Amino acid sequence: MNTYEEKLSLLSEMIAFARIDGEIHERELQFLSIVASQLRIEDSVFKSLFDQAAKKVIIKSEHQRILQFYRLALLMQADGVLHDNEQVAIREMGINMGLSPFAMKGVLVEMKRSPTGMIDPDIIMALFRAQQN
């Protein structure tokens, strides 16, 4: 992640995604807070993003776009309920990021198979690399 503006944009995108089902569940809020902390976003700035979204910044690095997709997928599963509109939205967001629909589907399938919902980063990258060949 290069700039503070990119970090704010990513976090805003995640907050908007968390709202897709009409509410932000406590576990989703906790997950967003952890991501904000990892991105070194101040708590007051993080809270302000719920009222005013940050300016959208396009992610140039494919690796960073894949990472953001994975963050969104983890967020989607945070509340324990998979809504149809979340599944549609994550696919649209991934496509808008220029990611392979087949690789995205593979990641979501692997996450569903995992008892924790998490998968090894090497597996994620292998799924996306396989679609490039």
Image: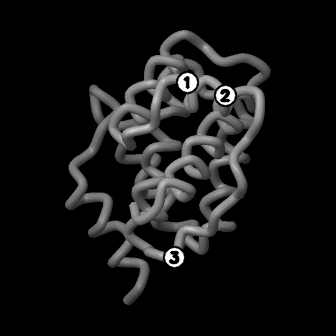
In space, the residues marked 2 and 3 are separated at their CA atoms by: 25 Å
Tell me if label 2 and label 1 are in contact, CB under 8 Å: yes
- The residue under label 3 is 60
Which is more toward the observer, 128 or 43? 43
Per the image, the residue denoted by label 2 is 48
Look at the picture and state if 6 lies above or below 43. below
- First in sequence: mark 2 vs mark 3: 2
Q: What element carries label 3?
A: loop
Say few, some or many: other residues with alpha carbon within 10 Å of mark 2 (under 14 / 14 to 19 / 20 or more): few
Q: What residue sits 57% from the left and 66% below the top?
A: 101
Relative to 42, say whether 11 is above or below.
below
- Helix or strand or loop: what does disc 1 sit on? helix
Residue 132 coordinates in the image, percent (x, y): 41, 85
SS of the residue under disc 2: helix
Distance Cα–Cα, label 2 vs label 1: 6 Å
Which residue is at a point 56% across and 56% down the rendered structure image?
5
Q: Does residue 45 appear left or right of residue 89 in this picture?
A: left
Query: What's the residue at 31%, 59% (across, down)?
Result: 124
Inspect the image, locate mark 1, and give the three-letter code of the amino acid beneath it: Ser
Of mark 3 and mark 1, the one earlier in the sequence is 1
Q: Residues within 10 Å of mark 1 (few under 14, many from 20)?
A: few
Question: Mark 3: few, some, or many residues within 10 Å (few <14, many ≥20)?
Answer: few
Q: Name the residue under label 1.
A: 44
Question: Residue 66: x percent and y percent?
Answer: 43, 62
Residue sitting at x 74%, y 25%: 21
- The image position of residue 90, as x and y in percent, is 63, 48
The kind of residue on which mark 3 rests is Lys
Residue furthest top in the image: 26
User: Which quadrant does the C terminus fall into?
Assistant: bottom left
Taking depth in this image into account, of 58 and 104 the one nearest to the observer is 58
Give the amino acid type for the residue marked by disc 2 in the picture. Ser
Q: Which of 98 and 126 is in front in this view?
A: 98
